[in-house]
Amino acid sequence: MSNASDDSREPLVEKHLAESKQEQPWMVYLSTFVAVCGSFAFGSCAGYSSPAQAAIRNDLSLTIAEAMRVSSAFCVAGWLAIFFANGVVALDLGRLATGYGMGAFSYVENSDQSLLSCATDSDLHWSVCFLHYRHNGLVPCAVSFLGLFCIPESPRWLAKMGRDTEFEAALRKLRGKKTDVSEEAAEIQDYIETLERLPKAKALDLFQRRYIRSVLIAFGLMVFQQFGGINGICFYTSSIFEQAGFPTRLGMIIYAVLQVVITALNAPIVDRAGRKPLLLVSATGLVIGCLITAVSFYLKAHDLAHEAVPVLAVVGIMMYIASFSAGMGAMPWVVMSEIFPINIKGVAGGMATLVNWFGAWAVSYTFNFLMSWSSYGTFIIYAVINALAIVFVIAVVPETKGKTLEEIQAIVNP
């Protein structure tokens, strides 16, 4: 590879930013901001209906099962349209239908957007809440849409497409006009050429013996992340508070603030603490949070300690959310990105994401039915699953912090 003889080099991004101290890399900041606006818009879309779910069902005379059947129908129709799509219209309609179905499934509040959405206005009518959401959701969508005209195309994509002139121009625009981008450009080109020489991976290749443990680790973490109850609990937080007798509006505000704070505090320690310790601490906190919440609903079901019920419920849920944000939320994705070789990473990532979203659907679909069966039993089930996650992490998941791909592969496939 070009320039491979250099024994020690700074990370390319840091090096080129250091070289351009005279020029602020404002284009990098702008590109990041535009990308983040997309995530913010996603949060706006997801955050609209959690506090209003009961009012939606009442006003539209929908039972839980009926609401979910309608959502399932949209999802099925959307996926069929995508599968049989021969053009852009069918593909777009399929994406629209699946998005509508998943949005109706969700009844979810997102950590950052719920501060701005109806989490703080849960007494509003759901239609007013929708208008409030549109105000918050349209702004980041508009910024993202307009911003995309101002930022350069991905240099790596341009290089992959063979558009060399545009590739170098985009890279220079990101790094600064006076920055020497030749070394970074050469490294990107070498990386792409290496990928092109690798055999094209298929889904069935994941089940080859050399990949099977990596698949077990990635898929196992995704299963435990979702089936530990996160989407059921997040999607129906306001309903949980209401059933426990805790003020819904106050609970949603505390929930939103806590998740933002924990996520922000956790970011600097991810690389310092390591993946495995964070997963273990997180899963332990999830077990404790589920058990505390289970105790709360057990007391309520048996008409005991009335004053303790709402306090225990909010403490348990907050413990659960804080613990999830501290490790189990992000670490499965980090580990997944580190344990697969380059040639199989795309296929493996796609399949792991499919497993993750299937788990999200299954948990969100079954949560209300489980709560109708036994509120405290539901949280005991989630506690058991999270306890199994602790065993899985100890027995199967390697520490990947600070290790090269070759070192990780040597650990995974001894």
Image: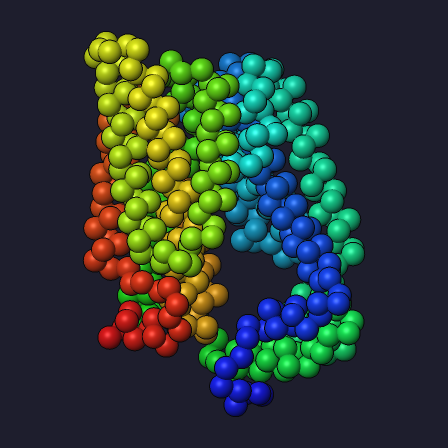
Q: Is residue 90 left or right of residue 298?
A: right
Look at 73% across and 62% down and name the residue there.
24
Q: How many marks?
A: 0
Residue pushed farthest bottom? 5
| Residue 323 position (above or below residue 19) | above
Q: How is the image coloured?
A: rainbow
Q: Which quadrant would the N terminus be assigned to in this image?
A: bottom right
Is the residue 128 above or below the residue 307 in the image? below
Question: Dividing the image into 4 quarters, which one contains the C terminus?
Answer: bottom left
Residue 126 lies, with reference to residue 151, above or below; the image says above
Question: Is residue 290 visible in the rendered structure shown here?
Answer: yes
Q: For residue 409, what is the image quadrant? A: bottom left
In the rendering, at what x and y percent does residue 370 appear? 31, 27
Instruction: Determine the image quadrant of residue 283.
Output: top left
As drawn, is 303 to the left or to the right of 400?
Answer: left
- Choose between 266 and 202: the one closer to the eye: 266
**Viewer-nearest residue: 1 or 380:** 1
Residue 327 % position (x, y): 38, 48
